[in-house]
Amino acid sequence: MAGSRSSTTRLLYTLRSSIYPSSRSPTPPSPITALLHLHRHYSAAPAVRAKDDKEPWWKESMEKVRNIGISAHIDSGKTTLTERVLFYTGRIHEIHEVRGKDGVGAKMDSMELEREKGITIQSAATYCTWKDYQVNIIDTPGHVDFTIEVERALRVLDGAILVLCSVGGVQSQSITVDRQMRRYEVPRVAFINKLDRMGADPWKVLNQARKKLRHHSAAVQMPIGLEEDFQGLVDLVQLKAYFFHGSSGEKVVTEEIPADMQAMAAEKRRELIEAVSDVDDQLAEVFLNDEPISAADLEAAIRRATIARKFIPVFMGSAFKNKGVQPLLDGVLCYLPNPLEVDNFALDQSNKEEKVKLSGTPAGPMVALAFKLEERQFGQLTYLRIYEGILRKGEFITNINTGKKIKVSKLGRMHSDSMEDIQEAHAGQIVAVFGLDCASGDTFTDGSVKYTMTSMNVPEPVVSLAVSPVSKDSGKQFSKALNRFQREDPTFRVGLDPESGQTIISGMGELHLEVYVERIKREYKVDATVGKPRVNFRETITQRAEFDYLHKKQSGGQGQYGRVVGYMEPLPAGSERKFEFENMIIGQAIPSNFIPHIEKGFREAANSGSLIGFPVENIRVVMTDGASHAVDSSELAFRLASIYAFRQCYAKCKPVILEPMMLVELKVPTEFQGTVAGDLNRRKGIIVGNDQDGDDSVINALVPLNNMFGYSTALRSMTQGKGEFTMEYKEHSPVSADVQTQLINAHKPKAE
């Protein structure tokens, strides 16, 4: 009897421990206590049980979500790849090419201009379903002028596909995109596209990615044949061969690996296992013990390493020829993270911007980021990525950046330029909302928390154009267009030239501004006259100098009196701020209420340097003393005193002009290398790298932007149309003495 009683106690204790594991005690409780615990669990705590039962609801649905972007160099086939993905997932029912003869154009290139030029200008968002998983895709531009679109997309994505061309390999914009992916810590898979083209060599591209991008990567597939003979792929994880049949490659046929390729497949699989073992301890242990590695073990190890951003699996195919897209989709599901596996941080505005880790689940307070705006026929459309909580139609949400409360009147999912209405969306999803008055980068919450998401990196514009409407009647539409484009695109700036009164638009390159001028014409029916492109120079100082200026004016009644004393000096290299003001006055020589107006005066003066009238950067102004008058001192007097003090002191600081330097990458046939290099020297370029790529020379050079206008025409004539180049902004650096003299002399007649 005693034995059976103790075994019952032990059984009840075990049951109780499984229900309340944290309440284990060294001695088993009495049977009565254990029964009481059991009773309490099954009757008095239905809420606990209900919560346990409910948990899998959102967990399962979030594990089946993928937010991915497709990024690459120009013409690597991003939009074509997205078009195939949409076709195979049933989102569209026929395929149209980017520059198709049918004139329809790719679904994701919804803008008329995109279809004409055959390039992507705006990121387009869509979603599709593949094997019960919901995949949100953003197709981004490859052109360096539209780099902000890539920055925005990567900020809100959990994973990405880096598309590389099997002929062109790793090109300049591939490097830029990869750098952006590193900045936003985005796990990625690579896809080597265009294996059907002449000169396709995926193994060369894989080695380039390892060297140039420092990728720790290995192929998870290998091609069966190349160029015209490209037939299918070998899956190195599952050790199967895939062939793509049907008019659009929709039927994937799985077969055994061809006998003549088995030895190479085994060798490449071993290479893949070794690469993953270097970064995954679990697989390394199995590998070192010489145990057989199953497909499931290898797949799990690749997933762990990819999500930890230690490894990049490389897929292959030809999107245009409809081969390799379905296995790539499987790879996105297998290897890229779901929203729960990615850490997202917010800044708590109510607690000195302390970094807060978001749970990423629908259970928390609602937090969403507006990462893209579009003006539609019925108002502003805002793309939101929800990081936490649930967003419901009809609810009120708060814009943390402005403090305004806004009602969510229309909520939907985007498919390129069409919208599908939904009632609610939870964490991890990308949705579109109509009628939100906000700017790009604003954070929305349900009002219970004051979180903002960290802001995006916005590059400075480098090229400016003077634009004005042809007819004066269209001025209203013209300014409406410019205001809208400024809100949509943070790299597009609008200003007024104080001398000529012209409207100046600034952007990331000639193409960027050309596209906006064309959009003003098409979308707002306003014809605009465009001036010659103008480079955004800057000015800076090279040495410290002191100022002591007294502004005194007596004209009957209250006069003006203000004296400012201090010094100006250059900021150290690499400073985050472009202008610093410091008040080091001891005592009350100048009443403290005038100090902000003195700073305002110096900032105003720094907007236009005296050399060529461009803004002055990297300058620190320190106030050490001053004087005021009980009656005549005023805010205006001190503001004017600081403006004149700046101008007086500026010449003593030995100012210099800074010009934007562009990192130019040229690819030219070797026989034209000497001619092109000579031309770069004439343009005051500095060659920083020269590589050989087959019969082509790849030249990297730093060239002043001012000397790069019209370069595409010059390069074509030098290389019989065979050369190509891309350029991106590197930095502002001082001009040579002769150029400085030229620029100052050219500015003088205007000033006079």
Image: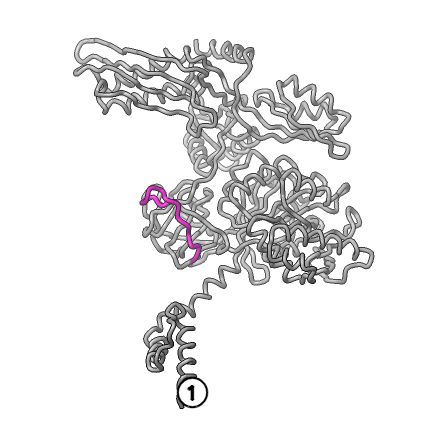
Question: How far across and down, in percent of the image, does residue 133 sit?
Answer: 55, 60
Q: Nearer the viewer, residue 49 or 305?
A: 305
Q: Secondary structure at mark 1?
A: helix
Look at the image and give the residue range highlighted in magenta.
Answer: 347-361
Name the residue rendered at 45%, 49% in the picture.
344
Q: Nearer the viewer, residue 479 or 302?
A: 302
How many marks can you see? 1
User: Quadrant location of residue 213?
Assistant: top right
The reply to whether the magenta stretch includes residue 141 is no
Q: Residues within 10 Å of mark 1 (few under 14, many from 20)?
A: few
Q: Please give the residue where the numbered disc 1 appears in the rendered image.
A: 3
Question: How far across and down, in percent of the image, does residue 384 sit?
Answer: 44, 48
User: Quadrant location of residue 561?
Assistant: top left
Going by the image, does 324 lie left or right of 663?
right
The outermost residue toward the bottom is 1
- Of the residues shown, which amino acid type is indicated by label 1? Gly
Establish if 663 lies above or below 237.
above
* Residue 105 seen: no
Going by the image, does 616 lie left or right of 335?
left
Location of the C terminus by quadrant is top left
Name the residue rendered at 67%, 25% in the picture.
713
Name the residue rendered at 65%, 28% in the picture.
700
Question: How far across and down, in percent of the image, does residue 52 sit?
Answer: 42, 69
The reply to whether the magenta stretch includes residue 358 is yes
